[in-house]
Amino acid sequence: MGQLFPVVYDFFMRPLERAKFKGIRQQLISEAEGRVLEIGSGTGINFPFYKDVIRVDAIEPNPLMQSKSIGRKKNAQVPVETYQANAETLPFANDSFDTVVATLVFCTIPNPVQALQEIKRVSKPGAKILLFEHVKMDNSFLGKTQDILTPMWKKLCDGCHLNRDTLQLIKEANLATTEIKSYYKGLFLTIQCVNQE
């Protein structure tokens, strides 16, 4: 499934992007400034939305996803450099970035706590951390359903955890949350944070 997922990702995401996600991504990314790190850039779906930034360094562990981003990288309005790398071991120096962006990616990171520690390491004190994620829902029935479906879903969707509590992980990482917006009854959140270190 690891090789099939990049092939079908854009096809299945297209209706969602048109319906709602495109606007959410654009609004969130409009907050980015300076030098930007994008975590899990996938097929480069965010690249067209970067405008008033110096440059974007984008990491993606899946080489097939990264290869599908080349066209969007070339057409971006700002310089974009892509790297095949994992969020848990970022190939950048301490205090390098003014903004970190991650959209619909924290659900798939094998060790999200380590990834958040790495994000804190490579981002400057006071840097913005901008996330758009699906999360475990507060509704007990729906949350339990997410728990039940997650083992199968992980196999089908490149390691995606339907039931990841990203907000709790952010609190544990000691990031200061400045804004949370909820979509689709709390299934999706945009989360803006600041690196306090």
Image (cartoon, grey):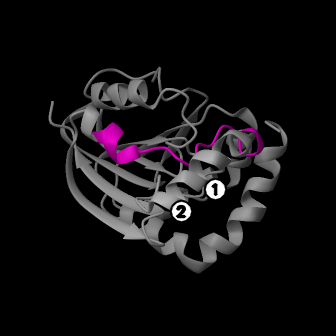
User: In this view of the protein, which residue sits in the foreground, 197 or 157?
Assistant: 157
Question: Residue 151: percent from the left, percent from the top?
Answer: 68, 39
Is 166 displayed left or right of 8 in the figure?
left
Image mark for residue 5: none
Are dots 2 and 1 in contact, CB under 8 Å? yes
Residue type at numbered disc 2? Pro
Which residue does the numbered mark 1 point to in the structure image?
Answer: 72
Question: Are there few (<14), some (14-19), or many (20+) residues within 10 Å of tag 1?
Answer: some
> What is the secondary structure assignment of the residue under circle 2?
helix
Question: Residue 170: percent from the left, percent from the top?
Answer: 30, 40
Q: Is residue 49 above or below residue 104?
A: below
Q: Is residue 29 visible?
A: no
Q: Is residue 184 above or below residue 145?
A: below
Question: Are there few (<14), some (14-19), or many (20+) residues within 10 Å of tag 2?
Answer: some
In the rendered structure, does residue 169 fall within the stretch colored magenta?
yes
In the rendered structure, does residue 102 fall within the stretch colored magenta?
no
Is 186 displayed left or right of 145 in the figure?
left
Image mark for residue 48: 2
> What is the secondary structure assignment of the residue under circle 1?
helix
Question: Residue 94: percent from the left, percent from the top?
Answer: 28, 22
Q: Which residues are magenta?
A: 155-170
Please tell me which of labels 2 and 1 falls first in the chain.
2
Q: Is residue 167 above or below residue 120?
A: below
Image quarter of the N terminus = top right
- The quarter of the picture where residue 171 lies is top left
Q: Residue at x 34, y 47 (%)?
A: 167
Q: Residue at x 52, y 60 (%)?
A: 141
Is 96 displayed left or right of 165 in the figure?
left
Residue type at numbered disc 1? Arg
In the image, farthest residue toward the front? 141
Is 76 displayed left or right of 61 in the figure?
left
